[in-house]
Image (spheres, rainbow, N blue to C red):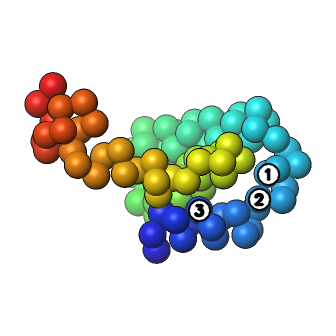
């Protein structure tokens, strides 16, 4: 699945509800999900399935925020297509 396809899928599932909630509240949900990812990363031993789910949740909330603000993450990711956006090297040399 491309980033664009993922963003469209998340929009199809959640856009209406997310738009009604609005950006400020949706952002707090996103931060909450980042907190859940942090907890999962710290857990010992790590549960790879739970970790995988938390990464998916954080990505889904990030994508939702981008959609609400009219940003294509596929397009935004192009900033890194030619290497580091500052020095343009891969790996970065700045
Ligand atoms: Zn660099």
Q: Which residue is denoted by mark 2 in the rendering?
A: 15
Q: Residue furthest top?
A: 94
Q: Position of residue 26 (x, y in %)?
A: 74, 41
Of residues 41 and 94, the one nearer the viewer is 94
- Does the residue tagged 2 have its C-beta within 8 Å of any atom of ligand 1? no
- Does the residue tagged 3 have its C-beta within 8 Å of any atom of ligand 1? no
* Local SS, label 1: helix
Give yes or no for contact between labels 3 and 2 (Cβ–Cβ under 8 Å).
no
Q: Position of residue 33 (x, y in %)?
A: 61, 43
Q: Is residue 24 left or right of residue 35?
A: right
Q: Which residue is denoted by mark 3 in the rendering?
A: 7
| Residue at point 41%, 60% (across, down) | 48
Q: Position of residue 60 (x, y in %)?
A: 60, 56
> Could you tell which of marks 3 and 1 lies nearer the N-terminus?
3
Of residues 71 and 65, the one nearer the viewer is 71
Q: Position of residue 83 (x, y in %)?
A: 21, 45
Q: Which residue is denoted by mark 1 in the rendering?
A: 18
Q: Residues within 10 Å of mark 2 (few under 14, many from 20)?
A: some
Give yes or no for contact between labels 2 and 1 (Cβ–Cβ under 8 Å).
yes
- Does the residue tagged 1 have its C-beta within 8 Å of any atom of ligand 1? no
Q: Is residue 94 left or right of residue 26?
A: left
Q: How many marks do you count on the picture?
A: 3
Question: What is the spatial separation of the Cα atoms under label 2 and label 1, in whole angstroms?
Answer: 5 Å
Question: What is the spatial separation of the Cα atoms under label 3 and label 2, in whole angstroms?
Answer: 10 Å
């Amino acid at each position: 699945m491309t980033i664009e396809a993922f963003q469209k899928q998340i929009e199809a599932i959640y856009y209406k509800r997310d738009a009604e909630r609005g950006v400020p509240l949706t952002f707090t949900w996103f931060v909450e999900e980042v907190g859940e990812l942090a907890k999962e990363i710290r857990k010992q031993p790590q549960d790879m399935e739970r970790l995988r789910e938390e990464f998916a949740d954080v990505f889904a909330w990030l994508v939702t925020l981008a959609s609400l603000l009219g940003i294509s993450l596929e397009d935004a990711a192009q900033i890194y297509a030619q290497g580091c956006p500052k020095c343009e090297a891969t790996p970065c040399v700045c």
